[in-house]
Image (tube, rainbow, N blue to C red):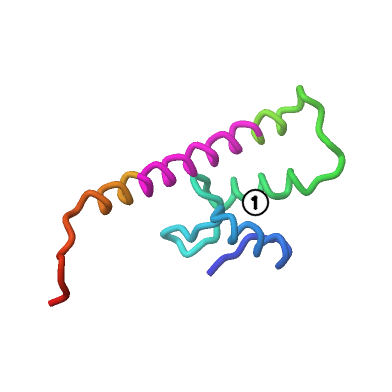
């Protein structure tokens, strides 16, 4: 498995928040992003220089962050919808 270059501490936080996934290529990624995009976003957020607002890398960071959040919302919505379906199902009154 190809893992993102992040500290164990940060990985634990991201996993606890449900932000990481494993893609079809056995790569650790942020939801909705490729491995390379995930690594860019993590590296950018770790960079202490603070890029200027007109910096092309800031624009890319914003785009990737938005895609990641949209993917997370789709997952959360799908989970809520499936949970609602389960609540509507009739349940047996007794054990078999």
Q: In front: 2, or 17?
A: 17
Residue depicted at 64% across the width and 51% down the height: 39
Q: Is residue 75 magenta?
A: yes
Q: Position of residue 68 (x, y in %)?
A: 54, 41
Residue 16: percent from left, percent from top: 59, 60
Start-end of magenta stretch: 62-80
**Is 1 included in the stretch rendered in magenta?**
no
Side of 24 relative to 49 (left or right): left
Name the chief secondary structure element in magenta: helix
Relative height, residue 10 to residue 30 (above, below): below
Looking at this view, name the residue that lies furthest to the front. Answer: 93
Task: Name the element at disc 1.
Answer: helix
Q: Residue at x 52, y 61 (%)?
A: 27
Residue corresponding to mark 1: 39
Rendering coords of residue 49 (x, y %): 87, 40
Left or right position of 74 against 12: left
């Amino acid at each position: 498995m190809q893992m993102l270059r992040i500290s164990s501490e940060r990985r634990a936080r991201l996993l606890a928040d449900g932000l990481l996934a494993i893609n079809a290529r056995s790569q650790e990624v942020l939801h909705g992003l490729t491995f390379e995009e995930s690594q860019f976003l993590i590296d950018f957020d770790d960079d202490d220089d603070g890029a200027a607002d007109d910096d092309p890398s800031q624009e890319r960071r914003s785009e990737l962050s938005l895609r990641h959040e949209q993917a997370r919302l789709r997952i959360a919505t799908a989970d809520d919808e499936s949970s609602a379906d389960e609540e509507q199902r009739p349940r047996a009154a007794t054990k078999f």
